[in-house]
Amino acid sequence: MDTIITYAAEILLFVYVVIAPAMVLGKVLYPRQPRSPRFALGMVVHLAVTPVAAFTLAMLSGGNVSTYLLVALATLLVVGGLALQVVLLKRKHQVLEE
């Protein structure tokens, strides 16, 4: 039972650290593309930006690239992307009201 919980936690962590930021980045950077190409482009951008940011932060702090650092970067990407989408949606809504 302990092995099942470990595997489930690793799968959820993978979804949170890899899949969710790729979906958000794709939606923010390429909003007019269909879903599949948007996800693929978001994944390419995410896999290019996140390792560079993780290694840079680890080097500046004098530590290692850890799971906590990757979760923190994923959280920043997801929250920042969702906040940007909210701002853009409010701006579009204000333009439609005028």
Image: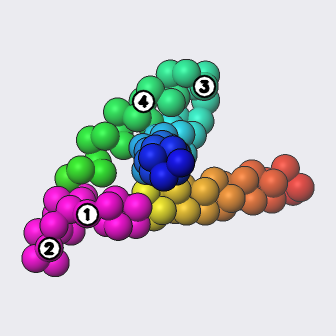
For marks 4 and 1, give the one nearer the viewer: 1
Q: Work out how far the residue at label 1 is from the one at label 3, CA to CA, in angstroms.
A: 31 Å
Q: Work out how far the residue at label 1 is from the one at label 2, CA to CA, in angstroms.
A: 9 Å
Q: Which residue is mark 3?
A: 35
Q: Which residue is mark 2?
A: 63
In-image side of 88 versus 20 (left or right) = right
For marks 1 and 3, give the one nearer the viewer: 1
Q: Which residue is mark 4?
A: 41
- Which quadrant does the C terminus fall into? bottom right
Q: Which mark is residue 66?
A: 1
Q: Work out how far the residue at label 3 is from the one at label 2, CA to CA, in angstroms.
A: 37 Å
**Image location (x, y in percent) of residue 47:** 31, 40
As drawn, the residue found furthest toward the bottom would be 61
As drawn, the residue found furthest toward the front would be 1
Q: Work out how far the residue at label 4 is from the one at label 2, CA to CA, in angstroms.
A: 30 Å
Give the residue drawn at x 50%, y 30%: 39
Q: Work out how far the residue at label 3 is from the one at label 4, CA to CA, in angstroms.
A: 10 Å
Range of residues picked out in magenta: 53-73
**Image location (x, y in percent) of residue 15:** 50, 43
Is label 1 in contact with label 2 (beta carbons under 8 Å)? yes
Give the residue drawn at x 20%, y 53%: 52
Q: Amino acid at mark 2?
A: Gly
